[in-house]
Image: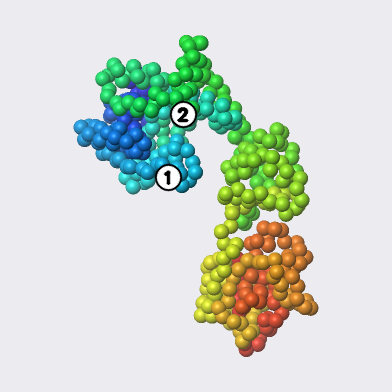
Amino acid sequence: MFQKFQAYLLKNFSDLKNQKILLALSGGLDSSVLLSLCLKNGLNISIAHCNFQLRGKNSEDDALWIKKLAEYKKLECHIKKFDILTYAKNRKTSIQMAARKLRYDWFNELSIKYNYEVILVAHHADDVLETFMINLMRGSGLKGLVGIPQIRGKIIRPLLPFTRTEILNYANENNIKWREDASNAKTDYLRNELRHKVIPNWKATDSNFHNQFSTTLEYLGQAKIALDNVIKDFKTNYFVEMEQEIKISVDKLKLLNPINFFLHALFANYGFDNVKDLNQLLDAQSGKQLFSKTHRLVKNRSHWLLTEQSEDFHKTYIIEQNFKIIQVPIKLELGLNTNLKIADRNIACFNIKLLKFPLTLRKWRESDYFYPKGLKGKKKLSKYFKDEKFSLLDKEKQWLLCSGEDIIWVVGKRVDERYSIEYNKEDRWIIKNYD
């Protein structure tokens, strides 16, 4: 196995010899063999161990065993305890998902702090098979069936070509010690049940099973690459990036076939994984919208508008009279008294005697109204938006400058008649909008 591992590294990861490496060491068979192979190859290894405190004294013994191993082999060692039960409960997630999140977040922190260029983990061919089976049973799409990636960011899995049997044989032949996790023998978890009951029977039907399975994964991987390119081309051509949103043609979406597959592939990464809702939005009336945890999709006539969730819609920003420039939430230059083109909508001239400081900047409310300069009387802001053909997103992006409860400027659009003053008057107070 060592020669095969050495050749695999040389072909796929030749730079590892010159890199600073963090190896995730649980103390079990797989990671212990990976450590042995890496040291035998002369790699610059440090180790990291997560103590999830799930097995009482055994968890503490694992951590102590790894600490002593590191001292014996003169390796830098990082060990951290996690209160995984509290973490999983607070986030309403499974122990397995919580462990994965905590583990990889910590590895990333270590890589930044200690300049580790690569993180090695000990997933192997049987792990890929088990993951394939789990995702198959859960109705996963092509992404889930392709399996565990060889590389993801800094993470590398150099044992993927090797089976559990090969790893065990190598450990026995080279007198490698490891810690046995008794929970791996139980069938409480789906993965363990597949490992001990289902997959052995499946393998027994064909001695060439792993080679055939690897070929199947290779074909699935090629299919995924082809489909990813189709998705990428569509987004390049029809996801039109505007200033704060992405505009997508509904007609172009409707031409995609099969529509359910493409809707999921295009929008799942934005948190929209309910294909039924996406289908309904295609034919919904203008103004209808969908929300994910991070994004929003709005139907705007013949297009969808995709935006990130806004955190400042209900915020109010204060502007004191002595302010000269503000940068947040938009850039305004205040109290100007220069030769500006007053016809520019981004410049507003106010009667300073009427202003009540501090002024405020905020977004619109349903009950808002103002007195648009050049028109007679007051007008509801919603009616003004409609007349100006504002989309829903245009309305939500629009900032209002207020004096007390009065809107004195729909910023960059229209000044309120009551507060407006001619440019050449003495009591003028000028603001310029740069956004």
Residue 250 in percent (x, y) is at 73, 45
In the image, 389: left or right of 317? right
Residue farthest along the right direction in this orientation: 376
* Contact? badges 2 and 1 (CB < 8 Å): no
In the rendered image, the quadrant that contains the C terminus is: bottom right
Q: Determine the secondary structure under disc 2.
A: loop
In the image, 305: left or right of 29? right
In the image, 131: left or right of 246? left
Residue on which the image places disc 1 = 87
In the rendered image, the quadrant that contains the N terminus is: top left
Q: Amino acid at mark 1?
A: Tyr
Residue on which the image places disc 2 = 189
* 358 to 396, vertically: above or below: below
Residue 276 in percent (x, y) is at 69, 40
Q: Amino acid at mark 2?
A: Tyr
Q: Nearer the viewer, residue 119 or 127?
A: 127
